[in-house]
Structures are given as structure tokens and as C-alpha cells.
Image (cartoon, rainbow, N blue to C red):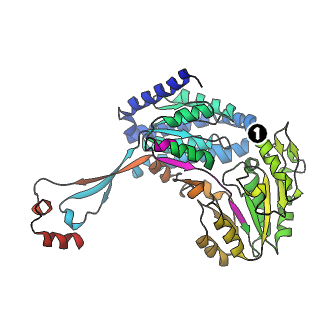
Amino acid sequence: MNDAAENEIIKRLSNQRAYFSTHQTKDVNFRLEQLRNLRKAVLQYRERIEDALWVDLHKSAEETYLTEISIVTGEIDNHIKNLKKWAKTKKVASPLHLFPSSSKFVYEPLGVALIVAPWNYPFQLLFNPLVGAISAGCCIILKPSPDTPTIAKVMEELIAEYFSPTYITVIQGGRETNKLLFEQRFDIIFFTGSPGVGKVVMKAAAEHLTPVVLELGGKSPCIVDADANIDIAAKRIAFGKLINAGQTCIAPDYLFAHQSVKDELLDKIIKSIHSMYGENIKNSRFYPRIVSERAMHRLAGLLNQGTIITGGEVDFDERYIAPTIIDDVSPDYSVMQDEIFGPVLPVMTFEHIDETIDYINKNEKPLAFYYFGKNKNVKDVLYKTSSGGGCINDTLMHVVNHYLPFGGVGNSGMGRYHGRESFLAFSNQRAIVSTPSWIDLPVKYVPFKYFKLTEKIVSA
């Protein structure tokens, strides 16, 4: 990236700081107007968004609507409905020793936000946090992934048509652009991507003490217990694993199946796959493609260990990897080391639930956690493990409930968003104590007369 491009980044950031200083974005009615404007833009561009995601990832229009567009419009509607309530000043109680003061906290926007999105859900994961940033009253620089260039260009055109660049702007580019952006001083950085790049973001942000929200990933486990409804488990696991060809940060990464049900479960997962995508999966318009040749090589390299019981077909020209289940997997295999991010499901077997709990707890905390079984073990499994979120007897569905916070823990991320949590993520909760001047109690001043009385009041 050349100096002109770096100068362009600095110029846009400076222009946004100047615009934020006008305080126009702090007005709640202004924010509501911009949210309605964004909704109008998304609906206006719906067909172009669908076409672009078909080009970049072979996503069907149906999948694009369900996993990208509808989530964003639902988030916008939720913020439009609730913003005035969320943004209201909140009065809180004051302890006796502050009498006659009153206390409150007010929400103020953090300032200029940088939102960096990945390629797997390139529209949703750029625009969903954008909703929160608008709602909180920030100015925003958006950075799409270069790995999905068609939708990146469409999003840039959408933003340019509906918003002033001094308020919201899109900056395109690759790794060097990211590096230059991270070197700038923002008031918040919202990053979605891998834990490895998340560490780079956090180090860069530390130079300016910039707060970060890191939405990362990890190896999200899926446990199927002996008493699970196998028909339902098979269908929901196949669905959760293969949406976007497994390129989903909360996809079931690996399967722990109870030995008494494993064979039946795997057989029914295979049947569920063919029920959804047909016998010739490569020709299904509902089965997406792997994002790049680099990703293809990485995924193909995971198929060399264990026993492939279905799938295994790799077509580099088509960027196609068949839905693949690998049995007889050992924890030291390559497929168990890092997040898979593709349509490959490794399977391990257990006899007692504590085996799965011990394994999960020996590794990094995952972004998602899935358990299929009856209620007798649910409480114990949740109590003894940790994850950003999860589902009982389902997969993925926690992400579509905007009343639930979404985010990771430990290696899978920090910070939360969706719904009110998105508003809070881009806001500063400013604590204010208001003290009248008609009385001035002497007890707080040096030399602390009546200290014994003051001590009793403070400790009461």
C-alpha cells in the first residue's frame, strides 16, 4: 500500500473526527433517522447483495436472506424500536453519605469506531455491528474482507450512496491496509476474525489504550448423549455444520458421540445431508463454495488422518469440498488442532459425560457449545464447562435471538453485541453525581472534624 493510500486513511479519520465534534450524531432522532436510512438501503440493495454473495461464496438467495440480510434488518428494527429507551439517562440511588447529592449515568458515544469484518458472512458481520455504532452515536470506518471482493464493492457503493463519508465510510484493502488502520487512534475497534489476528488487533490497540471488541472463534464442541433424540440431533447437526459450507465461526467444529448411539447418529447425519442437498451435492444451488484456493489447500490437508465415512471429494477448480465425516479421530490429529472452518466433521466417542467435559476444559474456551440429550445432564455439563454461548438440542440458534448477547470468552473473544449489547458496546456509561450548592456539609473537608460520626455514616 502506498503513501497516498495511507494519507487517505488519515484524511478520512480526521474528517470523521471533525464531524463527530459537531455533536450531530449524539442526537437520538438523528440516530433513528440513520437507522431507517440504513434499513432502506439494505432493502434497496437486497438483490445486489444476493447476487454478490452468489459470486463470492455460491450462497443461495435463500441462505443469504436467512443468514445475512434478515439478521441485519431484524437488528435495525430492534434498535429503532428500543433506542430511545436504551439511551435515556438512568437515575440510581445515592448512599447516605452523599446526601443531598443525586446520581445518574448517561450514555455517550465512544467516538470514531473502526469495524473490521471477515469474509464468511461478509455482509452480516460488517453491518450488524454498524447498527450498534449508529445506535450509540458514533462515526464509523468500515473495513470489509478482500477475500470476498464482489460483496465488498457492493457494500462500499451502498454506504457511499446513502451516507456522507464524514459519518460512515468504507476502506478497502488487504493485510497492509489493516496494519495501517490498526496503527491509527480510534475510540473503539470492533474486530471479527481469527484469534491469531485478534491478538494483533489487541496489541495495536494497546498503543492508544483503545477499547476492543473481539469476536473470534475456536473449536466449538457438539456432544450427543446416549438419551438424545437421534433423528433431531442428526438433522440439526447437519444443518449447523453445513450452512455456508461449514465456514461459520459457531459451526459445530467436532462431534463427541456416545458409543451407544454413534453408528446410528452418523448414519442419520449422512441421510440428513442428502435430504437437504440431494445425491449430487456439488450440483446443489444450496451448497456454498470454499472461499479461496488457500482455504481449499488447508482443508484438504485435514483429510489424511482418521476414517472418512462419507465425503472426502475435493475439487479445486470448483472450490468444492464435499460434506465429510471423519471417524476414529485422535485428539492429536491435525483436524483437532485448529478451528476447521469448512464442511469437515471429526468424530470422537465417549462412554461417560465427564470424558467430554475433561477434554473440552483442557483446551481453549470455545465460542459455541452444543449438547444433545435430556435434562438430567444439561445442568451439570453447562456448570462444568465454559463457552461464549450455545444451544441445548440445537445448533446456531442462539445467534439469531437479539435478546441474547453474542460473543466469546477467553481465546474465542471478548465483548458482546446484538440488541442492547450492541448499543452498549459502542457507548460510554458516564457516571455523574450532582450536588446542590445550597448546603455544604463540612465533614468531608480537612481536618475531618466529626470523623467518628462520618465513619459511622460511611460504614452504615
Q: Identify the residue shown where x is 69% and y is 75%.
A: 354
Q: Is residue 208 magenta?
A: yes
Q: Is 28 placed above or below 334 here?
A: above
Mark 1 secondary-structure assignment: helix
Q: Identify the residue shown where x is 83% and y is 43%.
A: 320
Q: Identify the residue shown where x is 82% and y is 69%.
A: 262
Residue type at the position of mark 1 = Arg
* Horizontal arrangement in the rendering, residue 20 relative to residue 290 (left or right): left
Image-quadrant location for residue 374: bottom right
Mark 1, other Cα within 10 Å: few <14 / some 14–19 / many ≥20: few
Residue toward you, 344 or 393: 344
Residue toward you, 98 or 419: 98
The number of discs equals: 1
In the rendered image, the quadrant that contains the C terminus is bottom left
Q: Is residue 284 magenta?
A: no
Q: Is 90 placed above or below 117 here?
A: below
Q: Is 110 placed above or below 371 here?
A: above
Image-quadrant location for residue 449: bottom left
Q: Which residues are magenta?
A: 204-222
Query: Which residue is the extreme one toward the bottom?
Result: 376
Residue 175, x across and y down, in percent: 62, 34
Image-quadrant location for residue 336: bottom right
* Horizontal arrangement in the rendering, residue 76 relative to residue 434 (left or right): right
Work out whether residue 164 can be spotted. no
Residue 432, x across and y down, in percent: 28, 52
Residue that label 1 marks: 294
